[in-house]
Image (spheres, rainbow, N blue to C red):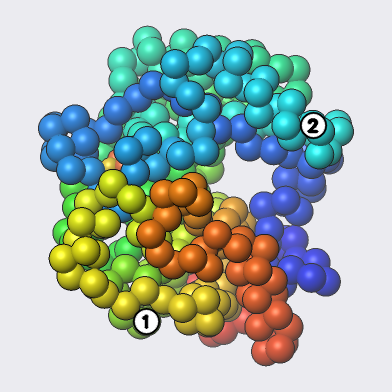
């Protein structure tokens, strides 16, 4: 089944959630006060090259606040826009399975009890932070709620994984996906377009590679340079070409056209807080980016999965 509409020729997460839960669903980003092995010195102190001071959770709640306060603040804003929505609580900043089982259990438990309209739990983590004890715990939560694990890959190419200092290789990512799918847990993968070590073909290959995994969703981000990141220092010393809006739209449409039409697209943009963005400026205009993608797909009369259907082989 797919969830294309007249305007959107790919599976948007909004349509998918509407189908699944019968109403608009908002993700509310909470901060569970985690760190990351790629930042605390276990693997490295630097983190991934693009990772912000807030552990790539710049729009998550404030870790100093209780979960209730974080949740209610965002819920109130959301409900001013749309009444009667449902919620998925999302642990986004840092590595949200990197803690004792006791901490994880308490946190996930508490987050699900914050509101009667919470219908699911989303957890962002790394492939190397999914030991058997964590997987067993996730398995348990997966029986009780709509659970999604968001895994960063960014690129399938080892040269790029090294360049961005991911601290894990492709095999570790694939193994993590398999372990999650063995337990029937939904997996959403993050990839980035525009990394200087990836060519156009490399980016396309990463998208095609996702078809070989039994994943349920993808987030496609554009690389942007955010202040106070390793990438910002690198960019200052070695300026490289960032994708233009047109280039990003072109590669992203190509990726969508190759992507298995059962995969749900959770995001096609990524953005830094306005005052922390160095470049490119256009990444702030999320609606423009998504409109341009829709326009190009209409112009080509294409839709998700139209090219090749090589994933069926
Ligand atoms: S895994 Fe996530 S939190 Fe850790 S350094 Fe990389 S982007 Fe940051």
298, above or below 269, in the image: below
Q: Which label's residue is closer to the chain start, 1 or 2?
A: 2
Badge 2 marks a residue whose secondary structure is helix
Q: Which residue corresponds to mark 1?
A: 200
95, above or below 249, in the image: above
The residue depicted at 41 percent of the width and 18 percent of the height is 104
Kindly report which numbered mark, 1 or 2, lies closer to the viewer in this rendering: 2
CA distance for labels 1 and 2: 40 Å
Q: Which residue corresponds to mark 2?
A: 79
- Of residues 308 and 57, the one nearer the viewer is 57
Residue farthest along the front direction in this orientation: 275
The percent position of residue 268, horizontal first and vertical second, equals 56, 62
| Quarter of image, res 37 | top left
Q: Is mark 1 within 8 Å of ligand 1?
A: no
For the residues bearing labels 1 and 2, Cβ distance under 8 angstroms: no
Residue 123 appears left or right of 199: right
The percent position of residue 164, horizontal first and vertical second, equals 23, 57
The residue depicted at 37 percent of the width and 49 percent of the height is 152
The residue depicted at 81 percent of the width and 39 percent of the height is 81
| Quarter of image, res 146 | top right
| Quarter of image, res 4 | bottom right
> Ligand 1 lies in which image quarter?
top left
Residue 251 visible to an observer of this rendering: no
124, above or below 248, in the image: above
Residue 114 appears left or right of 59: right
- Label 2 Cα crowd, 10 Å radius (few <14 / some 14-19 / many 20+): few
- Of residues 131 and 124, the one nearer the viewer is 124
């Amino acid at each position: 089944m797919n969830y294309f509409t007249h305007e959107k020729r790919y599976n948007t997460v909004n349509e998918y959630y509407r189908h699944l839960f019968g109403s608009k669903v908002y993700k509310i980003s909470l901060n569970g006060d985690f760190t990351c092995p790629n930042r605390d010195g276990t693997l490295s102190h630097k983190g991934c090259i693009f990772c912000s001071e807030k552990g790539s959770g710049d729009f998550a709640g404030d870790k100093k606040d209780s979960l209730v306060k974080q949740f209610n603040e965002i819920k109130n804003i959301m409900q001013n826009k749309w009444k009667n929505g449902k919620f998925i609580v999302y642990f986004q900043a840092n590595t949200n399975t990197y803690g004792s089982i006791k901490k994880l259990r308490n946190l996930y438990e508490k987050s699900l009890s914050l509101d009667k309209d919470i219908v699911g739990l989303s957890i962002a983590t790394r492939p190397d932070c999914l030991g058997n004890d964590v997987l067993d715990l996730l398995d348990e939560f997966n029986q009780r709620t709509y659970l999604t694990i968001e895994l960063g890959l960014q690129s399938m190419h080892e040269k790029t994984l090294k360049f961005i200092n991911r601290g894990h290789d492709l095999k570790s990512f694939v193994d993590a996906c398999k372990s999650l799918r063995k337990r029937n847990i939904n997996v959403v993968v993050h990839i980035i377009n525009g990394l200087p070590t990836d060519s156009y073909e490399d980016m396309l290959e990463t998208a095609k590679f996702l078809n070989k995994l039994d994943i349920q969703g993808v987030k496609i981000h554009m690389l942007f340079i955010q202040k106070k990141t390793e990438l910002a220092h690198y960019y200052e010393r070695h300026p490289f070409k960032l994708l233009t809006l047109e280039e990003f739209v072109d590669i992203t449409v190509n990726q969508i056209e190759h992507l298995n039409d059962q995969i749900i697209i959770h995001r096609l943009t990524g953005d830094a807080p306005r005052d922390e963005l160095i470049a490119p400026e256009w990444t702030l205009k999320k609606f423009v980016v998504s409109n341009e993608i829709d326009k190009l797909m209409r112009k080509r009369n294409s839709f998700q999965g139209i090219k090749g259907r090589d994933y069926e082989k």
